[in-house]
Image (tube, grey):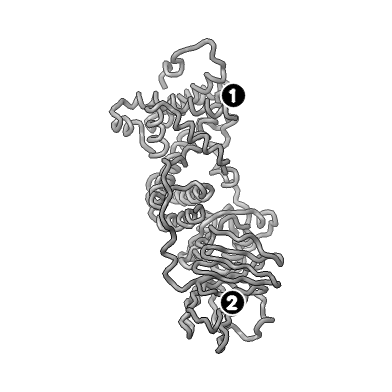
């Protein structure tokens, strides 16, 4: 850095803060250039150490720069969106947790193992896509189409049939297709429904909520959560063998990953288990899954046996 | 609708993920760092999902954001040894900030946009080309027909004004 740029247009009335600001701007601009030399960097350090206000001003430049990264040129918003979703009769996803033998003592008709997914075509033309470690029982009669989701998560694409409603039972929750595709999932913390096409009626403990396209809903602690509109795609990413977690607790994330990964992950630290994390985990390549997890999540893994792996906070 | 944007974001991001990973890997010379940067790209954009551009521009926006994060990563790597132990600058040597620390209030973002809009035209051009388009001084100079040194001077003006704006705001 040449000295004259630092003392350009000297003005005796300027406060020290303003000087620090201008000098910080000059240093930042200089070091932005990949051609900045080693001696530039050494002079930079000397400047930083000369006055704590310099470092403070420079820190502001870094933060300013970071914030500006997401600036964009303003654009007009128009047009119809998501038209691509409106082609089929409907679909939705439901997720659940183990332990609902009380509903049907029958063994599941279809189930998937760890890391396995499976698509099933039913007699009426509807399809079920089973996520990993998931199981369902199918019970079709002349007046009803009933599915019980025992464990895991399944995505339903429902063939229209007005005489026989299509109902998915998952724990306390009942999701009825109103012409439709949707997904239902059960975890120990919650049962949830996400709708991708048309509407689904969700009922539990005498309460009823109709979800429309793009909406999702959780049932946890015996009550409904908020209806969200921006999570449906992320909740269905497993269909592409990707797990997308948007501000989910690490405990829940680990539980989900256990459905995909051989062996068992355990979090001992309850504070770590409650920590909210946003991440995308690719479960295509299961051979390298532990590396993927350590890179994508703030965790370190230590395996004790092939079956048991402890999860701890990543040390920075 | 804001809600539609965010699901477009996810789809766009997932479709780009592999490509970003390989190009950033090459750029920063580390697969692990590239994994972090790609993940970080998604987190940062997800935090800003209510302010994303229109779907037709989303693709470019995701690519550009990841490139800018990679450029920043390299720049910080160059600087890190020289800010070691300096008060106020610890965050430069830390790993990437957690997304929760990183959420920025909407009105602050807006005021930054306004401050950029209020810069002298050349300073604004230079700032946007360097920051948003990730261009070097040499590239900007060629495009604007000015010397890299002049580009640098415009950059200093832009940064100082934006900093001044920030300080009077808070």
Q: Which mark is residue A52?
A: 1
Coordinates of residue B116 in the picture (x, y in percent): 46, 32
Coordinates of residue B21 in the picture (x, y in percent): 41, 52
Coordinates of residue B106 in the picture (x, y in percent): 55, 41
Depth-wise, is mark 1 or mark 2 nearer the camera?
2
Chain letter, disc 1 residue: A
Against B56, residue A210 (above or below) is below
Coordinates of residue A88 in the picture (x, y in percent): 43, 72
Q: Nearer the viewer, residue A96 or A316?
A: A96
Q: Which residue is mark 2?
A: A168
Q: Earlier in the sequence, mark 1 or mark 2?
A: 1
Q: Nearer the viewer, residue A200 or A36?
A: A200
Q: Nearer the viewer, residue B161 or A280?
A: B161
Q: Residue furthest bottom?
A: A142
- Quadrant hosting residue A144: bottom right
- How much space separates mark 1 and mark 2, taking CA atoms? 64 Å
Task: Label 2, secondary structure: give it.
Answer: strand
Against A109, residue B8 (above or below) is above
Q: Is disc 1 in the same subunit as disc 2? A: yes
Q: Quadrant of the N terminus of chain A?
A: top left
Chain letter, disc 2 residue: A
Pointers 1 and 2 in contact (C-beta within 8 Å) = no
Q: Residues within 10 Å of mark 1 (few under 14, many from 20)?
A: some
Task: Label 1, secondary structure: give it.
Answer: helix
Residue A156 visible in the snapshot: yes
| Residue for point 52% across, 34% down | B111
Q: Nearer the viewer, residue A111 or B126?
A: B126
User: Is A194 placed left or right of A43 in the picture?
Assistant: right
- Quadrant hosting residue A186: bottom right
């Amino acid at each position: 850095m040449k000295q004259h740029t630092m003392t350009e247009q000297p003005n005796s009335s300027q406060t020290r803060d303003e000087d620090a600001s201008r000098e910080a701007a000059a240093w930042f601009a200089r070091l932005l250039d990949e051609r900045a030399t080693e001696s530039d960097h050494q002079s930079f350090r000397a400047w930083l150490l000369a006055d704590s206000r310099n470092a403070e001003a420079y820190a502001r430049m870094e933060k300013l720069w970071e914030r500006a990264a997401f600036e964009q040129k303003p654009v007009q918003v128009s047009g119809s969106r998501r038209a691509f979703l409106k082609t089929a009769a409907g679909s939705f996803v439901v997720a659940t947790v183990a332990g609902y033998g009380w509903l049907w003592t029958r063994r599941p008709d279809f189930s998937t193992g760890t890391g396995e997914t499976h698509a099933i075509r039913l007699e009426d033309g509807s399809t079920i896509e089973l996520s990993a470690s998931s199981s369902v029982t199918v019970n079709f009669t002349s007046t009803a189409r009933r599915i019980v989701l025992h464990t895991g998560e399944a995505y339903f694409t429902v063939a229209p049939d007005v005489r026989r409603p299509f109902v998915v039972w998952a724990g306390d929750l009942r999701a009825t297709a109103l012409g439709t595709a949707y997904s239902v999932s059960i975890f120990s913390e919650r049962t949830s429904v996400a709708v991708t096409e048309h509407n689904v009626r969700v009922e539990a403990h005498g309460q009823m909520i109709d979800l429309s396209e793009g909406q999702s809903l959780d049932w946890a602690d015996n009550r409904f959560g908020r209806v969200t509109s921006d999570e449906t795609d992320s909740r269905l990413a497993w269909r592409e063998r990707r797990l997308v977690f948007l501000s989910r607790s690490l405990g829940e994330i680990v539980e989900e990953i256990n459905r995909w990964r051989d062996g068992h992950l355990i979090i001992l630290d309850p504070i770590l288990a409650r920590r909210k994390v946003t991440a995308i985990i690719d479960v295509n390549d299961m051979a390298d899954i532990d590396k993927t997890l350590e890179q994508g999540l703030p965790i370190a893994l230590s395996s004790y046996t092939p079956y048991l792996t402890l999860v701890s906070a990543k040390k920075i | 609708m804001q809600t539609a944007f965010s699901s477009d974001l996810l789809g766009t991001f997932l479709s780009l993920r592999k490509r970003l990973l390989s190009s950033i890997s090459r750029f920063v010379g580390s697969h692990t760092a590239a994994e972090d940067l790609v993940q970080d790209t998604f987190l940062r954009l997800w935090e800003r999902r209510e302010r994303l551009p229109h779907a037709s521009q989303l693709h470019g926006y995701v690519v550009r954001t990841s490139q800018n994060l990679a450029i920043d990563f390299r720049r910080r790597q160059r600087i890190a040894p020289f800010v070691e132990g300096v008060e106020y600058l610890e965050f430069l040597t830390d790993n990437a900030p957690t997304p929760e620390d990183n959420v920025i209030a909407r009105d602050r973002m807006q005021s930054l946009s306004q401050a950029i809009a209020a810069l002298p035209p050349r300073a604004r051009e230079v700032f946007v080309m360097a920051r948003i388009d990730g261009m070097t001084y040499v590239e900007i100079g060629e495009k604007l027909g000015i010397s890299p040194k002049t580009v640098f001077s415009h950059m200093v003006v832009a940064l100082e004004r934006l900093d001044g704006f920030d300080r009077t705001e808070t």
